[in-house]
Structure formats: C-alpha cells, structure tokens
Image: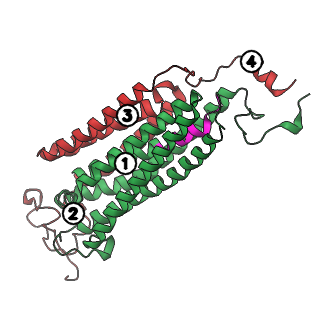
C-alpha cells in the first residue's frame, strides 16, 4: 500500500513525485517544459526583431548611420562579458554534477559579477545616450543627427536592450538563488534540475544578445 | 510497495541525462568559450570592412553560428533527443516565418501600396521615386489636405 501521507507535490531535493515513473523522466519533463518556455521567450523578442527589420528596411540609411552613434567598444565588451558569464554557468553545472561544491558556488559568483558588470555598462551607455539627447520616442532631442527614422532606431534600441536587460536582472536573481542553494549542498548526485533550468535561462539571455549585438551596434 | 521500489523496478526508457563522469574535464567548455569570443571579434572586424549589402547577412550568419554553438554545447542540445529539438526547430521556423514574410512584404511594395505617402505624395527620403514603375497619369500628389 502506498504511503499516501508521503506523496510529494513539489519535488524537494530531487525526490520523485507521485506522477513520475523515474527521476530521469521527471528531469526530462522539467527540461522539456523549460525549452517550451524558452520558445515563448524567443517569440516575445521576435515581435521586436520584426519591428526592427521592418523599419530598417524602410529607413536603411538612417539605421546604418544611427548604429555608428552607439559605442561599438561598449557593445563588444558587453558581448564578451555575457559570453564569459555563460561559460561560468556551464562550468557551475559541470562541477555541480561532479559534487564539487566550492567550485560550483565560485562559478555562480563569477556569473553574478559578470552579469552585474554587464548591467553597469548598459546603464552607463544609456546615461551617455540620454545626455546626448538620444531619447526614445518624442523625447528625442539630438540636433546633430536628424533624419527620418532616427527616433525610431533609438526607440527600438531602448525597447530591445531594455527588455533584454530585464531578462538579465531576472536571470541574476535566479543565479543568486541557485548560488545560495548550491552553497547549502542541495544539488546532490542526479538532482541538478534547478541548476540546469537556471543555466538554460541564462544561456538563452546570452543567445538573444548575440543577435542584438550585430543588429544594434555593428550594422 | 513504496514509490522508490516501484521506480527502481521499472526499466527507464526516458531520454537519460548525460551520465555523470567524475573525471570529465571542463576543457571543452573553455574551447567553446574561446570560439565564441573569436567569433565575436570576427563579427566586429567584418563590420568595419565595407561589405555593403552583404554586411547584414555576414553579421547574422556569424551571430547564428554563435547561437548554435551556445545551444549545442552550453545548453546541451547535442545530448538531448527529438522532443526538445522539435521545440527548437518550431521556434526557428516561426521566427523565420514572421521576419521573412514581413520582409517579403516591405521589399515588394510599389507606390500605391506604400503607407504614409498616398495623402501628400511620394516621399523622396523614404523611397527614391522609380518613375518607370508609375503610369503616366498616376497622380503624383494625391487628393488630400495639404501638409
């Protein structure tokens, strides 16, 4: 007779919940659900990519000229920061599966530091643009770069990099939570699910940036 | 029978997570990272060349390669089976459909189908006039209030 009083609704430290057959299947369901969620995230950004592609096709010359008003050094540096933070998340997952707790926590701390550095650069960049009058929408106040579509480029720039920055902030909260749990040795043996899901989210945030970087800064 | 015994008794047919190898080196991740950094710098370098109309395609191919590398190695897509790959493929198809169809639309516009222009006539800054495509009696300045 099943011990009904012990049936777990939410998995605690990798316990098998009642409706799954085995731990690998439970982990697979979590991973599959996470990928579907990431798919919806991609489609959320797709709307903005469509708007950007449309207006870039209409105002090609303006958009090309506007990209030269962004700092490509900032953009490249931010890309390298995110790529490196992704490496540390992947390493955290790798070492956690091997039971190396200190290395896991340190890797997640490095991710946190790199993510905060990214946000710092992003904030500094926005501050600089706003001071120069490259404000979104009808607040656009730069008098040196006036061309049809200039305000549209900067509105899309703030929308796309702003929505991305919100995802970075959410990702950093998840990384901090994972770091706390990893420091309490909660990810043991085959139970790595929260770490794996958090890592997937962080990598997706990086993947989106890998497309924002060339579109906003390089072209 | 407890749940644990039931779970142990059955053969696991689910796609398994990558087996834990306690001696596996982290080296491959560092190699992937180095590749991503090199591709970032390549993207930066090619954008400084004047590639004209191919610049966008080159930048997106490099960005797409980076995204694929992240998905395959950092997100472990190479280890996972059909269901997850189907989600990724669906996502890519939807993305390409949405961007591709709107681009096909904007690229094939001709004057009477262009927004913003029909009231006050064609805008030379948005679309340089291509007179050849217009009939002789096409109203250059359509009916409407003056700006």
Q: Count residues near mark 1 (Cα–Cα under 10 Å), then give few for <14, some for 14-19, many for 20+.
A: many
Quadrant where the C terminus of chain B is found in the figure:
bottom left
Q: Which residue is mark 3?
A: B68
- Residue A147: x and y in percent read 17, 69
Q: Is the Cβ of the residue at disc 3 closer than 8 Å to that at disc 4?
A: no
Of labels 3 and 2, earlier in sequence is 3
Q: Colour of chain B?
A: red
Work out whether disc 4 and disc 2 sit on a shared chain. yes
Is A2 placed above or below A68 here? above
Q: Count residues near mark 3 (Cα–Cα under 10 Å), then give few for <14, some for 14-19, many for 20+.
A: some
**Can residue B12 be found in the magenta stretch?**
no
Report the front residue among B10 and B133.
Answer: B10
Quadrant where the N terminus of chain B is found in the figure:
top right
Q: Which residue is depicted at the point 32% across and 38% down?
A: B64
Q: Colour of chain A?
A: green
Number of numbered labels in the structure image: 4
Q: Is residue A79 left or right of residue A36?
A: left
**Can residue A193 be found in the magenta stretch?**
yes
Q: Which residue is depicted at the point 61% across and 46% down?
A: A180
- The span picked out in magenta is A190-202
Q: Is residue B134 left or right of residue A73?
A: left
């Amino acid at each position: 007779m099943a011990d009904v009083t012990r049936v777990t609704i939410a998995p605690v430290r990798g316990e098998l919940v009642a409706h799954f057959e085995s731990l690998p299947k439970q982990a697979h369901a979590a991973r599959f659900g996470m990928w579907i969620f990431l798919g919806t995230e991609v489609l959320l950004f797709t709307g903005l990519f469509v708007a950007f592609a449309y207006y870039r096709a209409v105002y090609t010359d303006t958009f090309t000229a506007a990209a030269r008003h962004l700092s490509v050094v900032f953009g490249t540096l931010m890309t390298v920061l995110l790529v490196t933070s992704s490496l540390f998340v992947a390493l955290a997952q790798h070492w956690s599966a091997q039971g190396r707790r200190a290395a896991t926590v340190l890797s997640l701390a490095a991710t946190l530091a790199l993510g905060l550095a990214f946000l710092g650069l992003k904030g500094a960049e926005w501050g600089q643009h706003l001071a120069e009058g490259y404000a979104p929408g009808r607040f656009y106040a730069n008098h040196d770069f006036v061309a049809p579509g200039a305000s549209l480029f900067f509105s899309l720039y703030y929308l796309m990099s702003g929505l991305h920055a919100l995802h970075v902030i959410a990702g950093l909260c998840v990384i901090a939570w994972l770091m706390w749990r990893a420091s309490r040795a909660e990810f043991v043996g085959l139970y790595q699910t929260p770490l794996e899901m958090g890592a997937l989210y962080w990598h997706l945030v990086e993947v989106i940036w890998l497309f924002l970087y060339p579109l906003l800064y390089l072209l | 029978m407890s749940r644990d015994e039931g779970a142990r008794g059955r053969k696991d047919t689910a796609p398994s997570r990558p087996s834990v190898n306690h001696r596996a080196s982290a080296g491959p991740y560092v190699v992937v990272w180095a590749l991503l950094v090199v591709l970032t710098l390549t993207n930066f370098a090619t954008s400084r060349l004047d590639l004209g109309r191919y610049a966008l395609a080159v930048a997106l191919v490099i960005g797409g390669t980076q995204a694929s590398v992240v998905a395959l190695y950092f997100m472990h897509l190479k280890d996972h089976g059909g269901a997850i790959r189907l989600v990724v493929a669906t996502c890519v198809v939807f993305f390409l459909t949405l961007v591709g169809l709107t681009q096909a639309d904007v690229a094939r516009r001709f004057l009477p189908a262009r927004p913003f222009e029909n009231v006050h006539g064609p805008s030379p800054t948005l679309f340089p006039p291509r007179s050849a495509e217009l009939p002789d009696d096409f109203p250059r300045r359509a009916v409407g209030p003056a700006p």
